[in-house]
Image: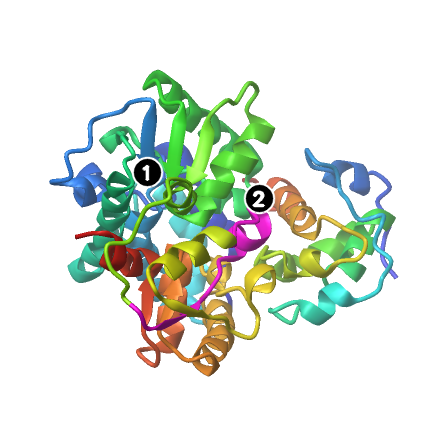
Amino acid sequence: MPMPTGATIGILADNLKKRNSVLPISTSGATRWARGLDLPRGGETVIYTGLMYQLIPYIAAMSKAQGKVEDSWLADLVGIGRYVNKVVNISAFMALPPGSMKETFNTMLANIALLLKKAGVEMGYLYGEELYSGALIYDLGADHIFGEHARKVYRSFKKNGVKNIITVDPHTTNMLRSVYPKIIKGYDLNVKSYLEVLFERNIQPLREIGGEAVIHDSCVYARYENMLNEQRALLSGAGVTVREPRDCGKFTLCCGGPAESLFPKKAVRQASKRVEQLKEAGGNVLTMCPICYVNLGKAAAGGIKIDDISSYLVRAYLP
Amino acid sequence: MGMVNPDFTDRVKGPEGFNAAACMNCGVCSAVCPMGIDLLPRKLFRYVLLGFEEKVLANSETIYSCLLCRMCEANCPAEVHIAENVRTLRNYINKNVFNI
């Protein structure tokens, strides 16, 4: 039996409504990546993580637990879990990721902030006041809960005097740039991905790192945000030869990640198909979305090397 | 055959409407779907437009399996907003079946 769809969405939506995130994480866990970076609190321009990179280790741990429950008699208990979760945060017990995985994603975020600094961007960070964008709940179609949350996020930006937002992943970029304006009256925030900002600022490489990398475009950057040039230009500036898999650019093949929360096995099957294409193109894959990174990595099981694009860029653009 | 619910189509419509009338049943969406979902969106959207609520609800797993990756939209000659339509159906099911 697959995971009960209604109960699973209910748990995630209840978490967003009651605890401001689909999988609640502690403030220290959410902000640890920024330690030592001297980012001022708030300001007109902020880096906004939307908690995506920080949440991925927890989502991966939750998905692993779900994989064991899916197709077993335990799936029946998820319905009861929703009622319990209203009072006690059960997802906190189910999702306990290894520290090394959290460290990997924190390093990616720190790299992104350092790249922006190198490009001359003066930005702040909202630290514990930063909220999740609600992307998963939007995708799952719980519109009224998403709408309330989006307005809460917007109010938090306005309260802190934020005018310009630099996002770090495609899903958060899409939410803040293309979805929020449709549902929030008078929405006036200027939203750009860090890849767009680095490109616009014409960040100059300190060295050419050379080599080849197979680019896995995110569906959201490619088909929702029409963003295909910036990442390639930055990699080219770094001296990296970009190789394209069979389905690429506007016609990139999804990593399967969006199916993860309800159908973990379908998500892995889809990711495996993509991994085969990436292997054919030469391996050494780079992603620009933490969901793609983790889902492809799970399917590849060490068969190919996968890195976040930021880890390539820091080697070329930072001292 | 299925029961027709004449109000169903109007109730499904989300903030951006339910954009499926332009679908010409060419099948490109089904051919390019990475999940191999052959029902979406041709039959499913037709069920909505015709008011076959039961048939739509019977395909809930398909509706929630869609990746919203827009591969179908990128290839759709009629520019149907397929992913948003699927999301709209999820919203309907969440509200009316799952009480979310």
Amino acid at the residue labelled 2 = Gly
- Report whether B29 appears left or right of A93: right
* Residue A87 - label: 1
Residue at figure coordinates x 36%, y 35% from the top left:
A20
Q: CA distance from mark 1 to mark 2?
A: 23 Å
Residue at figure coordinates x 79%, y 60% from the top left:
B42
Q: Label 2: few (<14), some or many (≥20) within 10 Å?
A: many
Q: Label 1: few (<14), some or many (≥20) within 10 Å?
A: few
Q: Name the spot of residue A182 as percent of width and height, x first.
A: 60, 30
Q: Name the spot of residue A57 as percent of width and height, x first.
A: 28, 56
Q: In the image shown, does A39 or B6 lie closer to the viewer? A: A39
Relative to residue A27, is residue B81 depicted above or below? below
Numbered range of the magenta stretch: A210-228
Q: Which type of secondary structure does the marked residue at label 1 adopt? A: loop
Q: Is residue A64 magenta?
A: no
Amino acid at the residue labelled 1 = Val
Q: Would you say residue A96 is visible in this rendering?
A: no
Tell me the subunit letter for badge 2: A
Q: Name the spot of residue A233 as percent of width and height, x first.
A: 43, 55
